[in-house]
Amino acid sequence: MLFLVRMDVNIPADMPEEKAAAIKATEKAYSQNLQREGKWVSIWRVVGEYANYSVFNAESNDELHEMLSGLPLFPYMDIEVIPLAKHPSDIH
């Protein structure tokens, strides 16, 4: 099942830079591992915002929830999930 996910990141302004940098590094490794596994299909930055649109491939809603809640930045995110279905005009 494919899902379009918008993630808006809101790291507290008073978080020490070292802590923020460590969380971001762990987040990058986690997300790249999911990409290598084919679970995080694509990621696109939203210009001018600390946000992204991503496509996830998950077997179920529960699996997607596990992936998203496992993100180190999850406690600092607003997330919107849109389930996707194949469009009848898609030539692929």
Image (cartoon, rainbow, N blue to C red):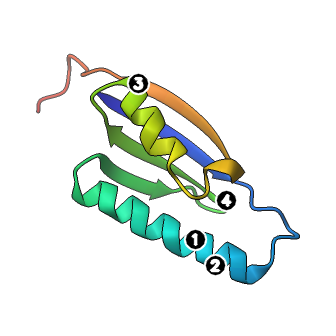
Q: Is residue 75 left or right of residue 54?
A: right
Which tag, 2 or 3, sits closer to the chain's start? 2
Q: Residue furthest right?
A: 14
Label 2 vs label 4, nearer the camera: 2
Quadrant of the rendering where the N terminus is positioned:
top left
Three-letter code for the amino acid on which mark 3 is drawn: Asn
Q: Are marks 4 and 3 in contact (CB under 8 Å)?
A: no
Q: Are marks 4 and 1 in contact (CB under 8 Å)?
A: no
Q: Position of residue 84 (x, y in %)?
A: 36, 25
Label 1 vs label 2: CA separation? 5 Å
Q: Are marks 1 and 2 in contact (CB under 8 Å)?
A: yes
Asked which quadrant contains residue 64, the reply is: top left
Label 4 vs label 1: CA separation? 16 Å
Residue at screen point 12% across, 29% down: 91
Three-letter code for the amino acid on which mark 4 is drawn: Glu
**Crowd rating for badge 4 (residues with CA inside 10 Å; few <14, some 14–19, many 20+):** few
Quadrant of the rendering where the C terminus is positioned:
top left
Residue at screen point 60% across, 77% down: 22
Three-letter code for the amino acid on which mark 2 is drawn: Ala
The dot on residue 21 is: 2
- 28 vs 22, nearest the viewer: 22
Which tag, 4 or 1, sits closer to the chain's start? 1
| Mark 1 lies on residue | 24
Label 2 vs label 4: CA separation? 18 Å
Three-letter code for the amino acid on which mark 1 is drawn: Lys
| Mark 3 lies on residue | 61
Which tag, 4 or 3, sits closer to the chain's start? 4
